[in-house]
Image (spheres, grey):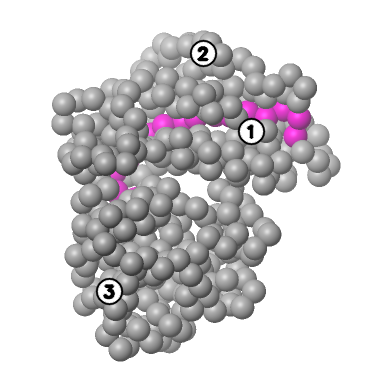
Amino acid sequence: MEIKITRAETLKEKPDSSTLVFGQSFTDHMFIVDYYAGKGWQDARIVPYGPLQIDPAAKVLHYAQEIFEGLKAYRTADGSVQLFRPMDNIRRMNASAERLSLPQVPEDLALAGITELVKLEKDWVPSEEGTSLYIRPFVIGVDPALGVHSSHHCMYIVIVCPVGAYYPEGLAPVKIYVEDQDVRAVKGGTGMAKTGGNYAASLRAGDRAEAKGYTQVLWLDGLHRKYIEEVGAMNVMFKVNGKILTPDLNGSVLDGITRRSCIQLLKDWGYEVEERRISAEELFEAAKKGTMEEAWGTGTAAVVSPIGELAEGDEKVIINNNQIGPVTQRLYDELTGIQWGRVADPHDWIMKL
């Protein structure tokens, strides 16, 4: 499908890449393509970035029929730009679309919307250490009608923004609080989909954790209320007695792209990785016994984020003396090295533009 490009008449001033914050400065253009039931995807276009014109009765505003993804473009030392595992994001997006009763975006169209927009906005890809161009593809249902039904008119949109570190702490260990009141997801729900409602429902617990001085919450399963699932916007991993433990993909845990990448690298390095149910009690006991060696979160936004403190109620434990551990550091160095083109890419995860 041909993509029509309408260039912005006035270009924005680009932010200082040394002071970037996450998700606040957007580029000059965005990609849009419409879907109509019975007709398919039509009118692919790149247009000047600006407000969307949707009806106040649009399904997305009332029934949250929406999915999204997150990936990044990286500036290498030779000035070129590359993406990290974009097809994995597109396939996960379509899995989310199926769960939310949204139309599948053909993979070639979904990828073209990303690559053509990034190419047009290549001057926005920062080169400062630790910076990148964050890419946010999303699909929304925009039928202008109330009533709980799937939308017949949908839009696939891509916006991009230069970003620095996701957490203010950077690579300093974060403090995590085990959430014991709210539930993020249950098997059969939408926990495995990347949809806004999951994140909206997490805000209250996040606010409570922040008020107590914690960066994120560690979610427990919705049935037994004892097995850990995710940390806020990240998957989570623990090194206990030399083994790597991470919650299995049980239908309520997001299949993270960074999670997949970390598991592959850890296996490459000879570590035993156990994907299974892990109780919060098991983790606290390991920390008390001194067998909890490291803990970290994984995700596109933060890449790898070390965890230095874990708390539940009045109980808290310190992990690795509140320092980043060697495995966490190695994962961060290897992943970012591949993403920025500083080290070899043995698994063909990189797509050069």
Q: Amino acid at mark 2?
A: Ile
**Front residue of 44 and 203:** 44
Q: Residue at x 42, y 20 (%)?
A: 116
- Image mark for residue 242: 3
**Mark 1 or mark 3: which comes first in sequence?**
1
- Write down the residue under mark 1: 104
Magenta span has 157? yes
- The location of residue 190, given as percent across then percent down, is 64, 54
From the viewer's perspective, is the residue at label 2 or at label 1 nearer? 1
Q: Residue at x 43, y 83 (%)?
A: 282
From the viewer's perspective, is the residue at label 1 or at label 3 nearer? 3
| Residue lying farthest to the right in this orientation | 147
Residue 278 in the image: above or below residue 67:
below
Q: Amino acid at mark 1?
A: Gln
From the viewer's perspective, is the residue at label 3 or at label 2 nearer? 3
Quadrant position of the N terminus in the picture: top right
- Image mark for residue 353: none
**Which secondary structure, mark 3?**
loop
**Front residue of 262 and 79:** 262
Magenta span has 72? no
* Magenta range: 151-171
Q: Whole-Å distance between the Cαs marked 1 and 3?
A: 42 Å
Density class for disc 2 (Cα within 10 Å; few <14, some 14-19, many ≥20) is some
Q: Are marks 3 and 2 in contact (CB under 8 Å)?
A: no
Density class for disc 3 (Cα within 10 Å; few <14, some 14-19, many ≥20) is some
**Mark 3 or mark 2: which comes first in sequence?**
2
Total number of numbered labels? 3
**Which secondary structure, mark 2?**
loop
**Mark 2 or mark 1: which comes first in sequence?**
2
